[in-house]
Amino acid sequence: MTQEISSKREAAIERLLAIMRRLRDPEGGCPWDLRQDFDTIVPYTLEEAYEVADAIERGAYGELQAELGDLLFQVVFYARLAEERGLFDFRDVVEAICDKLVRRHPHVFGDAEAGDEREQARAWEAHKRAEREARTGAPTG
């Protein structure tokens, strides 16, 4: 049963990615979607993020699923644009966030001792700082 549910969920994600590919297909895709680029969809991304926050603030959890779907679509859209440029794809985005969460939670996924919430927040910030320094080569903060 669990494997069946997992397969259905994976199929749903694949369906969303296929819909995005179709929308951006130069041969028969949507003209509006085809005109978009990283810059032009930023306002839509912000709007969708605010709609998620608004639904939560109003306690409108019945609307939250749809709003989260709209926000997820923005992530898929950016990933598709990046894939078209040969930069990365949606799976790369998912793998990167999974790796980051595991790295930043050694008290859950490793051998580190779990302190209180304040200690964990300090460790999280230290991990972020180290990652930023590794990317830029310069100390931060």
Image (tube, rainbow, N blue to C red):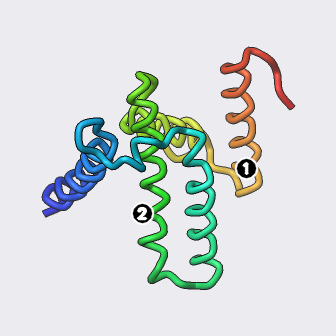
Query: How many dots with numbers?
Result: 2
Q: Quadrant of residue 130?
A: top right
Q: Which residue is label 1 attached to?
A: 121
104 to the left or right of 93: right
Q: Quadrant of residue 91?
A: top left
117 to the left or right of 69: right
Distance Cα–Cα, label 2 vs label 1:
29 Å
**Quadrant of the image for the C terminus?**
top right
**Which residue is found at the position 51% from the left and 38% from the top?**
37
- Given residues 89 and 113, the one toward you in this image is 89
73 to the left or right of 120: left
**Location of residue 39 in the rendering, given as x and y in whole percent from the top left corner:** 60, 40
**Location of residue 57 in the rendering, given as x and y in whole percent from the top left corner:** 65, 79
| Label 1 packing within 10 angstroms: few (<14), some (14-19), many (20+) | few
Eyeballing the image, is 83 above or below 50? above
Eyeballing the image, is 5 above or below 53? above
Amino acid residing under circle 1? Ala
- Please tell me whether mark 1 sits on a helix, a strand or a loop: helix
122 to the left or right of 64: right
**Which residue is found at the position 71% from the left and 27% from the top?**
132
Indicate which disc residue 69 carries.
Answer: 2
Amino acid residing under circle 2? Gly
Residue lying at the far right of the rendered structure = 141
Eyeballing the image, is 73 above or below 37? below
**Quadrant of the image for the N terminus?**
bottom left
**Location of residue 46 in the rendering, given as x and y in whole percent from the top left corner:** 62, 57
- Given residues 76 and 98, the one toward you in this image is 76
**Location of residue 50 in the rendering, given as x and y in whole percent from the top left corner:** 63, 66
**Which residue is found at the position 68% from the left and 19% from the top?**
134
Whether residues under marks 2 and 1 lie with C-beta atoms below 8 angstroms apart, the answer is: no
